[in-house]
Amino acid sequence: MSDRKVDEEEVPEPAPPELLHGAPVSWSAGQKVVHPDRASYLAVVEALKDDGFNVCIDLCAVDYLAQPSRSLPDDVAAERFEVVVNLVSHSRRERLRVRVQVPEDDPVVMSLFAPHPGSEAMEREAFDLFGVRFDGHPDLTRILMPEDWEGHPLRKDYATGRVPVQFKAAPASR
């Protein structure tokens, strides 16, 4: 037996989390997902546009009231609402998703209208149906519901209401 001291096996330090323009990155179904906070959301999207992600193909809101747990990077706090943006780079032949958490008590994010004018109707729809407001939007008015409609019908706590149905030959309710 040798008198040589055996070095303890070195445990590699965990890799630092992946960041893109200062925002945490995760992967979902082989697609890169960027998670900026609300304060950096617009700046991150503008930087991604400079990187070649110059087409906003989709923008929607999600209400996680009934499902508060979901897959997020460790340093991203889950909120009730989330705005999800899908960007495409034709030159890179790549898609990228942006997910920003939006709190229930202040459901506001910056509008993407300046860098992506095509997002105008999608932001109006997210406002109309979920109540998420987009600061800097040129015309944030209802797009699907009547102007006098109260509430936002795709929120999980929105009362759906009932229409009484009178069946044939059934006695009328009193």
Image: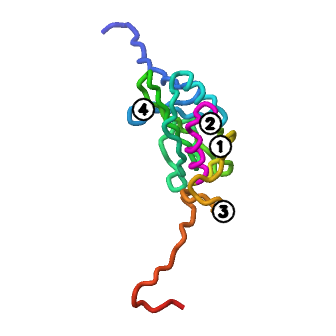
* Mark closest to the chain's N terminus, 3 or 2: 2
Res. 31 mark = 4
Specify whether 133 is left or right of 17. right
Q: Foreground: 108 or 12?
A: 108
The picture places residue 32, in percent across and down from the top left corner, at 45, 30
Secondary structure at numbered mark 1: strand
The residue type indicated by label 3 comes to Asp
Specify whether 87 is left or right of 42. left
The residue that mark 2 highlights is: 113
Q: Are marks 3 and 2 in contact (CB under 8 Å)?
A: no
- The quadrant in which the N terminus is found is top left
Query: Looking at the image, can residue 130 be seen?
Result: no
Distance, label 3 to label 1, CA atoms, is 20 Å
Res. 134 mark = 1
The residue type indicated by label 1 comes to Phe
Q: Are marks 2 and 4 in contact (CB under 8 Å)?
A: no
The residue that mark 3 highlights is: 148
Q: Are marks 1 and 2 in contact (CB under 8 Å)?
A: yes
Numbered range of the magenta stretch: 113-128
Mark 4 closeness class: few <14, some 14–19, many ≥20 residues within 10 Å: few
Residue 78 on the magenta span: no
Distance, label 3 to label 2, CA atoms, is 25 Å
What residue is drawn where x is 56% and y is 57%? Answer: 155
* Mark closest to the chain's N terminus, 3 or 1: 1
Secondary structure at numbered mark 4: strand
